[in-house]
Image: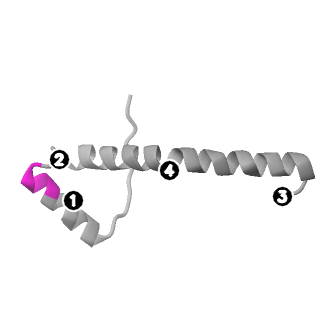
Amino acid sequence: MATAIQVHLPDDLISQAQRLVDEGSATGFDDLLTEALRRFLEAHGPALNEAFVREDVAWGLDGKD
């Protein structure tokens, strides 16, 4: 299953992405953006999850936001 999204990107990012597609480093924008998002989530997921857990624990101990 896949979901279509609409996003506004800076022209310089589009140019860089198009170059990668033209050079054969990516098969298309869909694949390029999917891979970029996957890598971002893999790299930042644990840190974000840890921050959320710390916030929840602090709230649970102090009862404050």
Q: How many marks?
A: 4
For the residues labelled 4 and 1, the Cα–Cα distance comes to: 22 Å
User: Type of residue at label 3?
Assistant: Asp
Res. 15 image quadrant: bottom left
User: Type of residue at label 2?
Assistant: Ala
Where is residue 44? Give x, y as percent.
50, 50
For the residues labelled 2 and 1, the Cα–Cα distance comes to: 9 Å
For the residues labelled 4 and 3, the Cα–Cα distance comes to: 23 Å
Closer to us: 65 or 10: 65
Magenta stretch containing residue 23, yes or no?
Answer: yes
* Quadrant location of the C terminus in the rendered image: bottom right
Where is residue 53? Give x, y as percent.
71, 45
**To which residue does mark 2 refer?**
26
Circle number at residue 17: 1
Q: Residues within 10 Å of mark 2 (few under 14, many from 20)?
A: some
**To which residue does mark 3 refer?**
65
**CB-based contact (under 8 Å), mark 4 and mark 1:** no
- Part of the protein shown in magenta: 20-24
Residue 21 placement, left or right of 37:
left
Residue at horizontal 34 percent and vertical 64 percent from the top:
9
Closer to us: 46 or 12: 46
Residue 22 placement, left or right of 9:
left
Q: Nearer the viewer, mark 4 or mark 3?
A: 4
Nearer-N-terminus badge (4/1):
1
**CB-based contact (under 8 Å), mark 2 and mark 4:** no
Q: Residues within 10 Å of mark 1 (few under 14, many from 20)?
A: some
For the residues labelled 3 and 1, the Cα–Cα distance comes to: 41 Å
Circle number at residue 44: 4
User: Type of residue at label 1?
Assistant: Ala
Residue at horizontal 91 percent and vertical 53 percent from the top:
62
